[in-house]
Amino acid sequence: MSMVSAQQDDEVMAEINITPFTDVLLVLLIIFMILAALVAPPGFEKQLPDKNDTSTPIQQKKQDNIEVLVNETGVIYVDGKRSDAQHIYADMADVRRRKGDKHVSLTA
């Protein structure tokens, strides 16, 4: 028996210790996370609205655009005026003549 145990002690274990590798990867991950938070690309800069600005973008959008609303029952409204499928092109042309070339906002 002692002969068998002596032979097993002489064998080389071929396992890789990944603990140092994992430590290095975690340190690199932390470094990159900190650098990503500190260095923002210029495309990510935002112009936030002023706190004192009382107008909302939705109100400005409603005044400037031609609004087309289709509700859940299928009723069509062009700029607040009720329309139907046969007269929608004529109604939109009338609104375009009044407001000029504007964007069309479709809400369905």
Image (spheres, grey):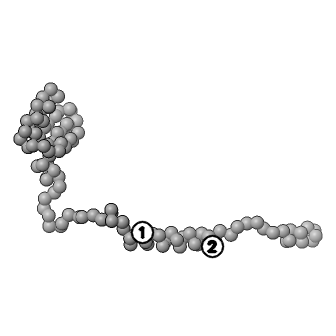
Q: Quadrant of the C terminus?
A: top left
Please report contact status of discs 1 and 2: CB closer than 8 Å, yes or no: no
Please state the horizontal and vertical placement of residue 2, each as a whole percent of the image: 93, 71
**Residue at 22 percent of width and 36 percent of height:** 72
Disc 1: which residue: 36
Task: Decide if residue 5 is on the left or right side of residue 55.
Answer: right
- Identify the residue at horizontal 38%, vertical 70% (top origin): 39
Name the residue at 11% across, 31% down.
90
Answer yes or no: is residue 82 visible.
no
Residue 97 location, x and y as percent? 7, 39
Vertical relation: 87 (above or below) 68: above
x and y percentages locating residue 16 in the rendered image: 70, 67
Q: Nearer the viewer, mark 1 or mark 2?
A: 1
Mark linked to residue 78:
none
Give the quadrant of the N terminus: bottom right
Three-letter code for the amino acid on which mark 2 is drawn:
Pro
57 vs 49: above or below = above
Q: Earlier in the sequence, mark 1 or mark 2?
A: 2
Label 1 is placed on what type of residue? Ala
Q: Secondary structure at mark 2?
A: helix
Give the residue displayed 21% in from the left and 33% down from the top. 73
The answer to whether one can see residue 63 in this image is yes
Residue topped by disc 2:
20
Horizontally, is 84 left or right of 15 in the view? left
Q: Is residue 66 above or below residue 86?
A: below
Please identify the residue farthest to the top as the structure is shown. Answer: 86
User: Quadrant location of residue 47?
Assistant: bottom left
Q: How many marks?
A: 2
Whole-percent x, y for residue 40 in the image: 36, 68
